[in-house]
Each structure stands twice: as structure tokens, then as C-alpha cells.
């Protein structure tokens, strides 16, 4: 990487969104919960820092800072080496209040995620949180989305897991990274602008007359969706504050796979159906009539082969899928999600989004900032939903098995809820990032997800050929702090 390098249009987008509204915090992150190390309890902070020293070599940009904190009217900042960089200045330890279970951990993490990263230094931070029940401990990490995917969607946390122990050979590719699989599977906030940086290839495609026509029609459809058929107005899209609330739900991947086999679709469709039910229950609990047309969700679409892992610069786009919150039947909701997802993937949406973002990448910074806000506006979508397919096998670090990963994607301005689901070691964990001021009732979303999983499992058991004894619907109760 050169000594200095100008931010791409995509990277600048996330800075511009923060500059436009103090309620937008454009960092991604995760809460990772581990069993005790062999000596018991949590590792020493010095041991974790030493491992980070080895991990950071896989992420050279994590040693860099912005040349200036804000994009200019005519130029974007550059990445430059941080002359005062020290890993230890980005790592610290924190203690949880008693009893230190999942509620306390998530409450602490919500405070951590409520604070923006300082733009005068490398844009990441990691905290060691010891003292969870049973000797467990956690790592809570965040990095600014302008850093890109880094070592997979969890950034420094993924590199930390992949780093070798002292004296061992380099480990290579980070162990915890996202693997795409149809709709909703990847890092959402790199997806929405995934083709912004494809200026040359986009221009080449536009030069072809037939491609011009296709792109023009697709872009027109996208414009109509934004300006003429706006996303419905709901309490989820009112002005929000700067503080966050973090909730989680857990489910067995085996059960999600059984639902998919019995009812059709993909695991991503099951995730979207669960999110739909949770959001529907939230609206109903507020005595709010769920919109008949559904909530418009922004979800990722992978335009490459599903056999490849996600990396910065790959062919990723966003799609807009209607979540049928107005439908009272679990079966009908699931069927609607399947149809909507398939239609979005095979229609003109990917090309329209690609064209808008490619053109946005060619715009000067002043105009690009306006386009970026449009692409993240409440008129365009109500809620962000993403699903990351992580490793099915257990991972460990410093001899301690990794038990739970709770992912977090950010809230854009006037978006009170964002849903991120991650599969790992046989369990799906849903991280629900909420605005603390307007979503004090966020526990209703979790209850709705749990109830929908039970309903879908019952529907799957009724299908011809289903096993005779499926038992009760099971929601995995593997809390982060126990």
C-alpha cells in the first residue's frame, strides 16, 4: 500500500453520513464471548495486546489515520501512517457490574457502541471484558466502516482470532469471516456501496449502447422507488439520538436448515422472516398499524460466486425487499419473503443500484455527499437486515474456545433499528442495534423472533416427509455471559 492513498468514494461515504447527522455512528463491531483460558478466567491484557501486535500485520490500514478528519468540498482525505500509533493505545480492559451476565454485557457494549471513534488516530478500538459467570470473558471491538471489510466483516476481531500464538507460524486468512449465500449474507455497510469503487468497469459497461439502455431503465426504477414510491412512514424512521441499545436472540442452525428444507427458500429467507415477525410485533405493541405494503428492508446481494469469501472491493450490491409485517400468518409471511427475495435478486434492482453507485463514485465530493445521504435516507428503506454465514466449526484464541459472537451493524440517521444475524458453530445469533431513546421496547422484537421460529418449525414439521418426532420448537439459550 502506498505511503498515502486517497479514500475511495465508498470509504468517504461513511464519513459523510456521520458529518451530516450526529445520530449516525458508522462503525461496525461485535461482542465475542470466550470460555476461560487454560489457567482460568480471562487472559492478561498484556497477552491480548501481544497477540494484537501480531494480528495487526494482516491489516496495514489499522496502523493508519485520516490526513484530515472530514471530507472536503472538492477532495477526500488520504490514508497516511499514524506516527504515534501503538496497539496498546487502542486496547483496554473494562469491568461489568454484578452479576455480569448477558444483560449487563450487552448494556455495557451498547454504551461502547454509542461513542464515535476519534478521527485523529487509527479508527478502531478493542476492549477486554473479564469477569463473566463461570470464568468466561469477552472482547468487544469496533472499527469505522471507512476502513472497509479489513479481515472480514469483524475487522480486528477476526484478525485477532487468526493471529498465531507466540512462536507459531503465521496463520494466514482470518478464521472468522463472512461467506455469502444469496440475499442478506454479507457485511451490509460495505454492500450498499460495494460497486462505488468500480468506476472504470462501470464506465466501460455504460459505453455499450445496449448496456446503457439496461442501466437507464434500472436506474429509473430505482429513482421511482425512492422519489415516487417511498418506503412507508413508521415510528422506526423518526429522528433518533446518539445512544444505542443492543439486544440479541439465539437459534439453532440445524433448526433453520430444517425449516429451509421443508418450506423452501434459503437460510437467508428464514432470517428475513424472523426479522419480519420481530418488527411486526414491535409495531403492534405500539398500537401502530403495520403497513400493508410491508417495511422496506435493505439487504445485501452477492453478485459473485457463493464459493468466494467476502473481501473489500468484491462485487456486492444492496437490494430492497418488502418485509410483510402486515401479514398475520407465519406461513404467508414466509412465502412472501421467499418470493420477494427471489424477485429482487433476479430483477433490475442489482443493476440499478450498481449504476447509481458507480455514477456516485464519479461525482465530485460535494455532490457525492448529497448522493450518499440519498442512498441511506429513510425514504429509500426502513430497516437494514443482514446475515453473515460464519464458520461452522468452533474457534479458539489463547487456548480459550470462542462460544458466542453477537454482530453489530450501524444505524443511519432516522433508522431506529438494524438487524444483523451471524451463524457460528451451529448457532445463529441475531444482534439488534436500536436507538436507546425511541426503542426502549426493543425486547418485543426478540420475543417476536422467538415466537416466529417456533411457528416456522411447527409448519416445517407438518410438511410431507418431515420427521415424525420433531419435538418442541427450540430457541437456543446460549446466553453470552453464562
Image (tube, rainbow, N blue to C red):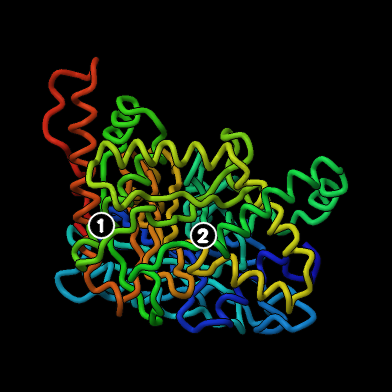
Q: Secondary structure at mark 1?
A: loop
Q: Is residue 140 left or right of residue 379?
A: left
Image coords of residue 344 (percent x, y): 53, 42
Instruction: Give the labeled residue for mark 2.
Output: 229
Instruction: Give the labeled residue for mark 1.
Output: 480
Residue at 40% across / 32% down in the picture? 265
- Crowd band around label 2 with a 10 angstrom C-alpha radius: few (<14), some (14–19), many (20+): few
Q: Is residue 353 visible?
A: yes
Residue 301 versus residue 51: which sits nearer the camera? 301
**Furthest residue toward top:** 465
Of mark 1 and mark 2, the one earlier in the sequence is 2
Above or below, 40 against 346 in this view is below
Kindly report the distance in space between the C-alpha atoms of the residues bearing marks 1 and 2. Answer: 41 Å
Residue 134 versus residue 362: which sits nearer the camera? 362
**Furthest residue toward front:** 228
Residue at 51% across / 60% down in the picture? 229
Residue at 66% across / 70% down in the picture? 371
Quarter of the image for residue 395 reads top left
Q: Secondary structure at mark 2?
A: loop
Image coords of residue 346 (percent x, y): 58, 36
Above or below, 100 against 217 in this view is below
Query: Which quadrant is the N terminus positioned in?
Result: bottom right
Query: Which quadrant is the C terminus positioned in?
Result: bottom left
Q: Is residue 371 left or right of residue 322?
A: right
Image coords of residue 113 (percent x, y): 40, 73
- Crowd band around label 1 with a 10 angstrom C-alpha radius: few (<14), some (14–19), many (20+): many
Q: Which mark is residue 104?
A: none
Image coords of residue 449 (percent x, y): 25, 50
Amino acid at each position: 500500500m502506498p505511503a498515502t492513498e486517497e479514500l475511495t468514494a465508498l470509504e468517504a461515504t461513511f464519513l459523510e453520513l456521520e458529518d451530516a447527522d450526529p445520530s449516525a455512528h458508522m462503525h461496525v463491531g461485535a461482542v465475542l464471548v470466550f470460555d476461560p483460558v487454560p489457567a482460568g478466567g480471562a487472559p492478561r491484557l498484556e497477552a491480548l495486546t501481544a497477540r494484537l501486535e501480531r494480528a495487526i500485520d494482516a491489516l496495514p490500514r489499522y496502523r493508519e489515520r485520516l490526513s484530515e478528519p472530514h471530507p472536503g468540498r472538492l477532495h477526500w482525505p488520504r490514508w497516511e501512517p499514524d506516527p504515534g500509533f501503538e496497539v496498546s493505545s487502542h486496547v483496554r480492559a473494562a469491568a461489568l457490574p454484578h452479576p455480569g451476565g448477558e444483560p449487563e454485557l450487552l448494556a455495557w457494549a451498547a454504551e461502547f457502541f454509542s461513542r464515535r471513534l476519534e478521527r485523529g488516530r487509527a479508527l478502531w478500538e478493542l476492549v477486554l471484558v473479564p469477569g463473566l459467570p463461570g470464568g468466561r470473558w469477552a472482547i468487544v471491538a469496533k472499527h469505522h466502516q471507512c476502513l472497509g471489510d479489513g479481515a472480514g466483516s469483524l475487522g480486528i476481531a477476526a484478525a485477532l482470532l487468526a493471529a498465531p500464538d507466540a512462536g507459531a507460524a503465521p496463520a494466514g486468512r482470518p478464521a472468522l469471516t463472512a461467506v455469502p449465500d444469496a440475499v442478506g449474507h454479507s457485511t451490509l455497510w460495505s454492500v450498499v456501496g460495494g460497486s462505488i469503487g468500480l468506476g472504470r468497469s462501470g464506465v466501460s459497461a455504460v459505453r455499450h449502447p445496449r448496456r446503457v439502455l439496461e442501466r437507464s431503465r434500472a436506474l429509473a426504477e430505482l429513482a421511482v422507488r425512492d422519489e415516487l414510491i417511498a418506503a412507508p412512514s413508521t415510528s422506526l424512521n423518526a429522528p433518533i439520538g446518539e445512544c444505542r441499545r443492543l439486544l440479541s436472540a439465539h437459534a439453532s442452525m440445524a433448526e433453520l436448515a430444517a425449516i429451509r428444507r421443508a418450506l423452501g427458500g434459503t437460510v437467508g429467507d428464514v432470517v428475513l422472516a424472523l426479522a419480519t415477525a420481530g418488527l411486526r410485533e414491535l409495531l403492534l405493541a405500539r398500537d401502530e398499524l403495520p403497513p400493508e405494503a410491508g417495511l422496506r428492508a435493505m439487504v445485501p446481494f452477492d453478485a459473485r460466486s457463493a464459493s468466494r469469501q467476502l473481501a473489500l472491493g468484491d462485487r456486492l450490491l444492496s437490494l430492497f425487499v418488502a418485509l410483510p409485517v402486515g401479514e398475520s400468518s407465519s406461513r404467508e409471511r414466509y412465502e412472501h419473503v421467499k418470493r420477494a427475495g427471489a424477485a429482487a435478486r433476479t430483477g433490475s434492482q442489482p443493476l440499478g443500484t450498481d449504476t447509481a453507485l458507480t455514477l456516485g463514485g464519479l461525482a465530485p465530493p460535494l455532490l457525492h455527499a448529497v448522493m450518499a445521504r440519498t442512498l441511506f435516507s429513510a425514504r429509500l428503506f426502513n430497516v437494514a437486515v443482514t446475515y453473515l454465514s460464519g464458520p461452522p466449526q468452533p474457534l479458539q484464541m489463547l487456548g480459550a474456545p470462542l462460544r458466542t459472537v453477537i454482530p453489530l451493524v450501524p444505524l443511519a440517521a432516522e433508522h431506529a433499528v438494524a438487524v444483523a444475524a451471524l451463524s457460528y458453530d451451529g448457532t445463529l445469533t441475531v444482534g439488534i442495534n436500536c436507538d436507546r431513546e425511541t426503542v426502549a421496547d426493543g425486547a418485543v422484537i426478540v420475543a417476536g423472533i422467538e415466537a416466529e421460529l417456533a411457528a416456522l418449525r411447527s409448519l416445517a414439521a407438518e410438511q410431507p416427509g418431515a420427521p415424525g418426532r420433531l419435538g418442541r420448537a427450540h430457541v437456543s439459550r446460549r446466553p453470552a455471559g453464562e
